[in-house]
Amino acid sequence: MSETTKLRLPLLAAAQAQKHVTHNEALLKLDALLHLEVIDRDLAAPPPGPADGDRYIVAAGASGAWAGEDGHVAVWQDGVWRFHVPQTGWRAYVRDEGALCVKADAGWLALGAGGGALQNLTLFGLGTQADAENPFAAKIGKALWTAKTVAEGGTGDLRYTFNKESAANVLSLLFQRNWSGRAEMGLIGSDDLQVKVSADGATWREALRIDRATGRVTFSQGIAPRAWVTLTDAATVAIDAAAGDKFRLTTSGTRTLGKPTNLTDGVRFLLRVINSAATTLTLNAAYAPLSGSVPALRTGAGQGNTFDCVYDAAADKIFYAWY
């Protein structure tokens, strides 16, 4: 054995003459390869005027003094180019890319930021261990994705693309609690968009389906009616539009229905007034009947009025139908 296995450093032989030559050759190789840093890895021909110690990874299609040295480490030492065959697993910092590269069977792969490409990984774990079932895994507190701006060479848009092989396959987002499924959304066994929920991670119920062909929405379990919000009886009745969409008031005496707070354009709500005794009922000036004429409100005991209201922010009016 005349050299080492990995770095191929020359070994001293027994009774060898001029041992310093072999020793110095080994030191030169160590100096060239230890903490390997190269200037470039995209050149196929040697650059002009190299400085002593300059190092490069030779690109494919090498020519001139680098001919036949594709992928090898070229070092300018003592006025000549010396070449070193890299072993799988060697690492090199590429100065012009600002990236750390590793020698793989397929060639040199960039692992760092600064413009390097991370390609064809089989497993990637961020803060946790990836495995065959979950080749990409991340254990993090927050995540941010933002569009590349026009000034940075992007379009300002950000679009995620998810793809499955056939309609019968599943393409979904699965939401879990303590590793037990509670909700799932996506193309689940068909090409219709579905939302499913589960109380235990075992029994699933479809809540919503949007037909892929018609866009028709089906609420598979029906729509649960919202509960009535009971209003406090007072001279001026206060209504918070953010509290619900159905309000009920049981009242007597002289009452004014106030303008609701927290109104947003297009919000719709139902208001039912039940008279427990003879009642004088008036409406805030913001209320406007859809028919154009103010209806004669029922004021007798045991009677009532129902207002189907919608708010128009531009007019700042609550238009209502009365029955």
Image (cartoon, helix red, strand yellow):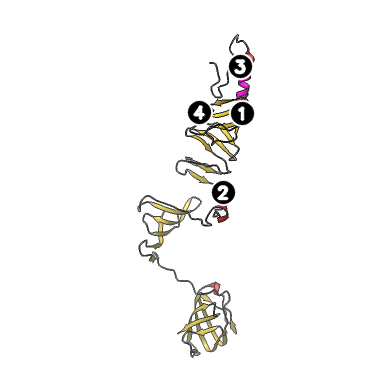
Q: Distance between the residues labelled 2 and 3?
A: 53 Å
Determine the main secondary structure of the stretch shown in magenta: helix
Q: Say which label, 2 or 4, has the lower sequence index.
A: 4
Q: Say which label, 2 or 3, has the lower sequence index.
A: 3
Label 3 residue SS: helix
Q: Distance between the residues labelled 4 and 3?
A: 26 Å
Q: Which of marks 4 and 3 is in front?
A: 4
Q: What residue type is disc 2 on? A: Ile
Where is mark 2, residue-wise? 140
Q: Say which label, 2 or 1, has the lower sequence index.
A: 1
* Residue 106 sits inside the magenta stretch: no
Where is mark 1, residue-wise? 34
Q: Mark on residue 67?
A: 4
Q: What residue type is disc 4 on? A: Ala
Tell which of 136 and 178 is nearer to you. Answer: 136
Q: Is residue 194 above or below residue 20?
A: below
x then y, percent, for residue 86:
53, 28
Where is mark 3, residue-wise? 22
Q: Which residue is drawn at 56% across and 29% down?
A: 74
Give the residues in magenta: 23-30
Q: Distance between the residues labelled 2 and 1?
A: 35 Å
